[in-house]
Amino acid sequence: MTPDLVFRDPYFLDFLGLTNNYSEKDLESAIISELQQFITEMGSDFAFLARQKRITIDNIDYKTDLLFYHRRLKCLVAIDLKLGKFEAGYKGQMELYLRWLERYEMVEGENSPIGLILCSGKNSEHVDLLQLDKSNIRIADYLTILPSKELLLEKLHRAIAIARQRLEANNDNQ
């Protein structure tokens, strides 16, 4: 079991019933209200641990939106919810959370924590240049309204093409 097999992109959160105008707090509250469906969308083996987990560093309080534990990966999963597109600064924020969790919350036998930043959009070049996988951070889009069938098919074909390119690159490297 690897993080690449566990985390998806995008996540469909249409069951939250959010309209066009909502805040991060509204998004988080809706997820907590529909926690069972949210965990089902995330995938199996996730266990909910905390909402607004307080992290105090140098007498400054920070809060990660949601904290889960993944049984098969044997690690904490910090989830940060963002309304807009992914921004480079989110990486530093998540790295801070992950290092704190690693130092103060991780127990013997667990793997390093993983961060998941859920955004309503992302720029692939930003994600690529920041090398988030080396920091144990994943970025994924979320959709609160299901897209059209045509858009879903386009995304499926794009994902298949990317997977083929990666497979060919791996075969070339062997």
Image: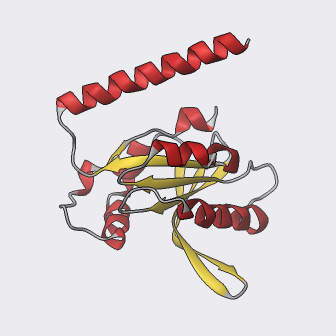
Q: Which residue of the protein is positioned furthest toward the right in this rendering?
A: 108
On the rendered image, what quadrant is the N terminus found in?
top right
Q: Which residue appears at 75% of the width and 50% of the height? A: 110
- The foreground one among 103 and 136 is 136
Give the answer, above or below, for where 80 lies relative to 7. Answer: below
In this figure, what is the number of numbered marks? 0
Please say if 26 is above or below 114.
below
* Residue visible at 70% across and 64% down in the picture: 101
- The answer to whether 102 appears left or right of 51 in the picture is right
Q: Residue at x 31, y 64 (%)?
A: 30
Residue 57 shown left or right of residue 68 in the figure: right
For residue 128, say whether it is visible: yes
**Closer to the camera, 138 or 77?**
138
Left or right: residue 14 versus residue 126 is left
x, y percentage for residue 152?
26, 31
Q: Residue 130 in the image: state x and y as whole percent.
A: 61, 50
Is residue 70 visible to us here? no
How was the colour assigned to the protein in this rendering? Answer: secondary structure
- Give coordinates of residue 58: x percent, y percent: 73, 85
Q: Quadrant of residue 172?
A: top right
Task: Give above or below for 89 relative to 157.
Answer: below
Position in image of residue 62 (x %, y %): 58, 78
Query: Which part of the image, by quadrant, shows the C terminus?
Result: top right
Q: Along the line of sight, which residue is nearer the eye, 49 or 131?
A: 131
